[in-house]
Amino acid sequence: MAAQSKSFLSFLLALLLGAAPALVAQNILGYRAARLPDSTVAVYRVYDNGTQVRVARLPSDASRGRFAGRALLPYALETTPGQLNLNQFGLNKYFSPNYRFSVDLPGPFTVAQRRAQGVTLFSNLTQPESEKTTFPYGDGIRAVFEQNVLQGVLVGTGFAESDLATVESILQTTCPQVGAGNEVGNKYIYFNFEIGVFWKKESYLNKGTWEAKKLTSIVCESDGVTRTLEQLDASGLWPAEERVRIQNRYGLVNAITRQKSVAGTMISWATGLYGQLYPNLAVATQTSIPFEGTCDVSHIGGNAQGQITLNGRSYTLTGNMYEHEDFQMAYNYLYNFDITRADYNDIWVNKLPGTQNYPYLWGKIAPMHIVAFEKGYWQLLRYRMNARFSRYWPTMRLMAPVYEANAAGIVDGQYQNPEAARIPFAAMQETGGADQPKILQPPYLWYSRYITHRFLEGDGGAGSGFYMFPINPSQIWGDLSQWANFKTVLHCYTALYQARNDMQPYERFFAGSTLVEDPQVYNPVTTAYDTYNGTQAFAYDGGVTGTRRPAYSIRYKVQADGSYRVLVLGGMVQNWTDERTDIISVVGNLNNAKFSIKLRGPAAHVYEFVVPAGESNQTYTANFSAQTQWEKPGYGGRVGAATN
Amino acid sequence: MAHVPVTIGTSSGWYIYTDSITCQAAQTQFLGLSPAGRLAALTVEPQLPAGKVTADRLCGETYASIDSDVFFETVPATPPVVTTGDPGAEQNVTFYQSNSNDDGGTI
């Protein structure tokens, strides 16, 4: 009896492990062949659900096919609150060191386990204390917040108000020494200043300190004249003075950090050149940046070349702070979501049975044009890099997993604080007067955000990457279910690893590939091809949303046999089961190939094509059939259990 | 004096060279330092490993005001190990269609 049971179980196991892909696949789409590093050829049977299995050989009648490949791993959703089943996508895969991946949520995992899961960058928040002095250089990133550096008299308005020598003396102590000691692993550092660097009269009015401070005298660094703050305000010179003072101080942060740290340290100001906005047509071509101005020490004891001695130490402070930035932390949070009044009432007001869980809520939040958002934002950053500084530098996309607004939900198009403010689920309520948890973003947004940035950034080099910041830096270790924020399924986190693994087959492809940011897209209405960028696809113009268009980009690389290997990224805001098919191409390139791309739902899609050498003017198709058992509202990619 | 961390394959090592930051390449001497010992197990190396930042590059930078040790991150000295289980290592990808599907079955 026991032997029979074992045999039956073995049969079931074999069925699940070996034949499951064939059983769950709807149709055989064709075959994909590739030469492996040992020169053998691997042949895969490709199914129209995006899966493939390796087979012995190409069929005898095989002929070149003009269809797409697609890499989608099944994501079996966790059901236990606080659980992260990140190992399900496979371990110890190759990931390029030229695109780092950081998630500030170690939970129960060790550094070694996290590396195996695909994490390649660890903030100082996630480096265990016991490993800090031995952390491999280049695998660490140092987060610096205002309170870490702007201490003593530099708190708040004191940063700008204090004279430069005072600022220097404190920064000498508080700026980190990156790359040595407890910071030995940290090559990257970002300074997230949010208060003292915005120095205005309102800074005092808001704190109620204006009357006490207005007669304080400062030597203005923009012209060398001594004025009280009240006189500065009356002179109309405050904005100009603010620009110079903030640049001089950022210049000191930059100089002192580089002096104290090891050579090769890479600095970011954690404020993207586009600020924190939707991609917006109204400001898309403007070239203003968050911190204007240039260093100027010529009126306070320095010279026109920016050389100045402070407390016996010599500095050269020149230019705008972004001239000295090595990588751009693409810091742009998502603030709000849209939901209907009926769904809001079900979930927040009436708390109907079946509605009090994240998968339900995520399915009810209106889809957004996430690929256009991320593509537009990436392009807008680079537009300003080039327009203002005549160079491009790597970007690291940063965001926390939640909607940032205190009241994030926009109900039936109307924002009424505090509607849909915080999570209503009873199991997630904070006690003791703490703020209730913010709303976690749907998994498809994280899935798509990673894919889009990974695709566009390519093999970006040191400083390029993706960084998920924590909800709360003090809630990242151990059993996550101990905190209200995590007393739920954490699919939005796992979806990020799902995306990383869905893109993994292309990790070696990116190096040497060519990006076509804006291929031409056929417009069936005008019967013409349109070329437009991500911001235009997002179609948000100063608060008014126009007609959205699908967002596409292409990457290609010539293979050893002269063919083009082509990756297509696409996405369109549409309902979960809506589909559209677009024809795209690159003018005068890729043998005049056209690519017919089907997009289903709003998440990012990536397809792989091969355009053979010598084959021109052909159409290649990505026309996968719907796989309803593998999809779920609020999610991207292939979602479901392997036994689907 | 400069510390130079390098990565070779999957193992990390540290290298130190003994001249000042303004050295000329010809004056450079390389000493290997075990990752475990950091300040122990120094051995003379004939040269920096392949893929290292060169001494010229080192000397070309301006670090005159730095009085502490200087570290350099380097590119891997050898390409990462490629395995047949790594789909990203595939070359000459081609797509085929078939009506017979006599592919010999899964392997």
Image: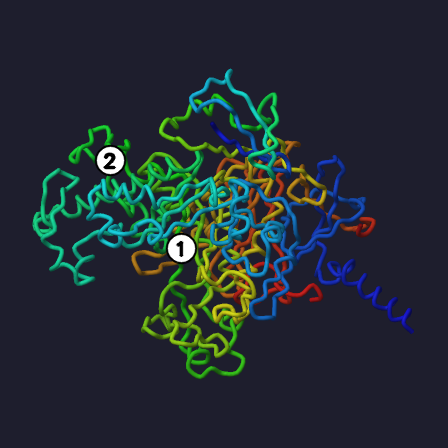
How many C-alpha atoms fall within 10 Å of the one at disc 2: few (<14), some, or many (≥20)?
some
Residue B92 as seen in the image, left or right of residue A11: left
Residue at label 1?
A538
Q: Which colouring convention does the figure follow?
A: rainbow
The chain letter under disc 1 is A
- Identified by mark 1, the residue type is Phe
Is disc 1 placed on a helix, strand or loop?
A: helix
Q: Residue at x 31, y 60 (%)?
A: A543
Residue at label 2?
A310
Residue A51 as seen in the image, left or right of residue A99: right
- Of residue A298 and residue A464, the one placed in the foreground of this image is A298
Residue A518 at what x, y percent from top left? 45, 44
The mark closer to the camera, 1 or 2, is 2
Residue A105 at what x, y percent from top left? 52, 58
- Of residue A482 and residue A607, the one placed in the foreground of this image is A482
Name the residue at the top extreme. B26
- Identified by mark 2, the residue type is Leu
Q: Can residue A23 be seen in the rendering of this structure?
A: yes
Q: Can residue A570 be seen in the rendering of this structure?
A: no
